[in-house]
Image (spheres, grey):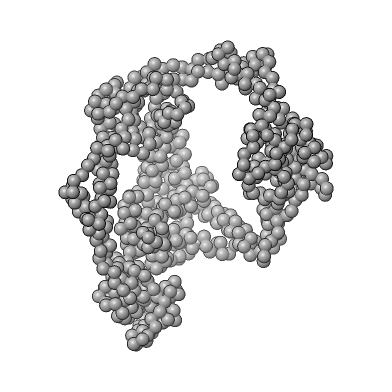
């Protein structure tokens, strides 16, 4: 019924549906896709052509993301993978859309309206805001018309998925087995023996140092480096130069005033009598309800609950909340926006049936004045103007970097930038934002830049663009053992300390498994300290975590938890034990008891969760069957 839904809805359909399709598209297109030689540049699913504009938009967004990772050239293999994945996505979503049409799924305008108005991104202060809604769609490059159709398709998909979910169930034995495993708890205790505790006794003899160096020579190379020169264009520097007098701000206000205008809105209630094949009967019922609603003192809300066929609003006494004229179909809007508060009018005929309308309240057009917005407009203007100037400067720096490829001087002079230097630039250079950026590093060591050319303009961070040059290229050189002796000796000692920690943890675990207490088992290595939440122990302290029951997702150290739940269930009075590397140490662990998971209450919540998992599997299988039966024609030229 709501026209703004009929006229305004297509962007988030793909934003929501495509991730869903990606999850479903696990079978790939190979084996069901016919790679045609037809020159129609099309992707067809069961004879239906996929929307090429949408496909190309998704493809370009994917390439743009990859382009930021690979500024010089996107590898061909990655392009192929993106194309395969997008074809997969569109095949899946098209099959689901076809199925919802075949099964005659319908989404009412009321349902569409509720979906849109409830989306937080379209709201201001908890209420739907049309300017925010339209601005967000525009910023994503979507029309409201396209958004509506895609959102409607999404809701149909949800209805189809909901039907499968509602029919899914788990039998009592399945539920019992699943809960017993999923909610199983184990009594686990463990002690961490830190490597630091064994370092003092670790020795690094010269033969061991020499052998370690020979085995790990590749770890002791000088880094490949260049002398890096660069210029940086920063939006913050542009913003700081922008000022505006009152006349400028008033002119800016006139260009954005519509954003601060709230159109007239009306708070209405309605009673809907659905359209039926017997139009006369529907009209007669509507006349009768209208007569009751028009009586002095009539309780319109109660009548809506009693008579309205619009289920969701009927529960609320027919309340439609505040809505602008564009929210409604023309006949409904024309009636509502010619009424006075308190007036009841009807029956009004629309494609949905007969409406009896009551106007509760009018919220008039309201525009914030320049004086109200003055303090807000200055930073907004500066930001908008800076973005514009930065965009112009970015185009210019890209052009100059290309035209004067052999030098940064013309680029710096034309834009008033300083040429900055990093004499020993290499991968992993600590504390340097350029070295932390993969695109800059790739450019600095690319063949073109090493050959004396400027790089392309690279976005370092949003609002910062750099162009780099490289000189004095130095290839990695092997460092001698004498140069790295201290580093190698330290590595040898740490390796020996780690081996000692492993051996100690194995011995401790075996002792605990034989019946010793933790304190007795750990005594040869020191006195443990008990783990205390929120407090850190010294680096060389043995930390003991007393026995407690934990689940598969409980917050004990992940390595210990995984090992403990992989261990066999211990026999009565016995323990399952073992050791596992953990952070900067080795943990000896023990499982002393196991409790299977039990149904809680009547088990309904756990049953619903398991049924949901079953439904997910069944839906994936449902889609797999559709794909297996589908006729798909794919011409790779669609990506050219």
Q: Which residue occupies the foreground of this view, 486 or 323? A: 486
Residue in the picture at 26% in, 44% down: 382
Q: What is the x, y in percent for residue 442?
A: 42, 27
Can residue 45 be seen at all in this image of the molecule? no
- Relative to 118, say whether 527 is above or below: above
Quarter of the image with the C terminus is: top left
The quarter holding residue 337 reads bottom left
Quarter of the image with the N terminus is: bottom left
Q: Which residue occupies the foreground of this view, 284 or 582? A: 582
Residue in the picture at 44% in, 16% down: 474
Q: What is the x, y in percent for residue 24?
A: 52, 51
Q: Which residue occupies the foreground of this view, 98 or 215? A: 215
The quarter holding residue 395 reads top left
- Relative to 178, say whether 238 is above or below: above
- Horizontal relation, residue 174 to residue 359: left or right: right
Q: Which residue occupies the foreground of this view, 363 or 88? A: 363
Q: What is the x, y in percent for residue 331?
A: 29, 73
- Relative to 587, say whether 145 is above or below: below
Q: How many marks?
A: 0
Residue in the picture at 73% in, 54% down: 596
- Horizontal relation, residue 414 to residue 465: left or right: left
Q: What is the x, y in percent for residue 358?
A: 33, 78
Can residue 193 be seen at all in this image of the molecule? yes
Residue in the picture at 62% in, 58% down: 610
- Relative to 81, say whether 16 is above or below: below
């Amino acid at each position: 019924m709501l026209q703004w839904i009929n006229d305004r809805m297509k962007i988030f359909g793909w934003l929501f549906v495509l991730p869903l399709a990606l999850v479903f598209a696990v079978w790939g297109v190979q084996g069901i896709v016919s790679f045609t030689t037809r020159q129609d540049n099309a992707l067809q699913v069961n004879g239906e052509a996929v929307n090429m504009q949408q496909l190309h938009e998704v493809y370009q967004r994917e390439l743009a993301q990859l382009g930021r990772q690979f500024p010089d050239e996107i590898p061909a293999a990655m392009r192929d993978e993106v194309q395969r994945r997008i074809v997969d996505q569109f095949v899946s979503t098209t099959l689901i859309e076809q199925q919802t049409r075949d099964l005659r799924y319908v989404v009412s305008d009321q349902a569409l309206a509720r979906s849109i108005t409830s989306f937080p991104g379209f709201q201001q202060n908890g209420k739907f805001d049309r300017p925010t809604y339209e601005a967000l769609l525009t910023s994503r490059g979507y029309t409201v018309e396209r958004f509506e159709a895609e959102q409607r398709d999404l809701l149909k998909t949800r209805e189809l998925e909901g039907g499968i979910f509602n029919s899914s169930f788990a039998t009592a034995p399945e539920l019992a087995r699943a809960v017993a495993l999923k909610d199983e708890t184990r009594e686990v205790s463990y002690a961490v023996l830190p490597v630091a505790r064994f370092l003092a006794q670790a020795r690094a003899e010269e033969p061991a140092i020499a052998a370690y160096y020979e085995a790990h020579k590749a770890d002791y190379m000088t880094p490949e480096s260049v002398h890096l020169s660069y210029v940086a264009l920063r939006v913050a520097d542009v913003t700081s130069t922008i000022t505006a007098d009152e006349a400028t701000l008033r002119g800016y206000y006139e260009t954005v005033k519509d954003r601060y205008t709230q159109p007239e809105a009306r708070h209405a209630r309605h009673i809907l009598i659905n359209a039926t094949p017997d139009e006369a009967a529907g009209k007669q019922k509507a006349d009768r309800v209208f007569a009751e609603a028009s009586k002095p003192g009539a309780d319109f809300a109660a009548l809506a609950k009693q008579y309205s066929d619009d289920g969701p609003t009927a529960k609320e006494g027919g309340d439609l909340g505040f809505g602008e004229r564009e929210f409604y179909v023309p006949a409904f809007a024309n009636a509502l926006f010619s009424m006075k508060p308190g007036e009841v009018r009807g029956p009004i005929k629309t494609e949905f049936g007969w409406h009896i309308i009551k106007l509760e309240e009018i919220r008039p057009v309201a525009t914030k004045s320049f004086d109200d917005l003055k303090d807000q407009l200055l930073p907004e203007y500066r930001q908008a103007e800076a973005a514009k100037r930065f965009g112009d400067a970015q185009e210019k720096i890209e052009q100059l970097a290309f035209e004067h490829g052999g030098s940064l001087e013309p680029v710096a002079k034309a834009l008033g930038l300083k040429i900055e230097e990093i004499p020993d630039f290499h991968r992993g250079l600590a504390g340097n934002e350029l070295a932390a950026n993969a695109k800059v590093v790739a450019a600095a060591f690319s063949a073109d830049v090493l050959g004396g050319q400027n790089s392309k303009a690279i976005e370092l961070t949003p609002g910062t663009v750099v162009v780099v040059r490289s000189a004095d290229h130095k290839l990695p050189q092997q460092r001698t053992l004498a140069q790295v002796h201290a580093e190698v000796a330290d590595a040898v000692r740490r390796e020996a300390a780690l081996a000692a920690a492993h051996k100690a943890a194995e011995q401790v675990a075996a002792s605990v498994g034989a019946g010793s207490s933790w304190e007795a088992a750990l005594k040869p290595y020191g006195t443990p300290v008990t783990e205390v939440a929120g407090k850190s122990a010294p680096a060389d302290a043995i930390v003991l975590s007393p026995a407690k029951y934990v689940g598969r997702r409980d917050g004990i150290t992940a390595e210990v938890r995984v090992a403990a739940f992989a261990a066999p269930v211990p026999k009565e009075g016995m323990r399952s034990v073992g050791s596992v590397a953990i952070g900067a140490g080795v943990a000896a662990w023990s499982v002393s008891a196991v409790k299977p998971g039990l149904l809680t209450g009547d088990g309904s919540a756990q049953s619903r969760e398991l049924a949901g998992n079953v439904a997910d599997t069944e839906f994936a299988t449902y889609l797999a069957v559709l794909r297996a039966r589908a006729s798909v024609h794919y011409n790779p030229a669609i990506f050219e």
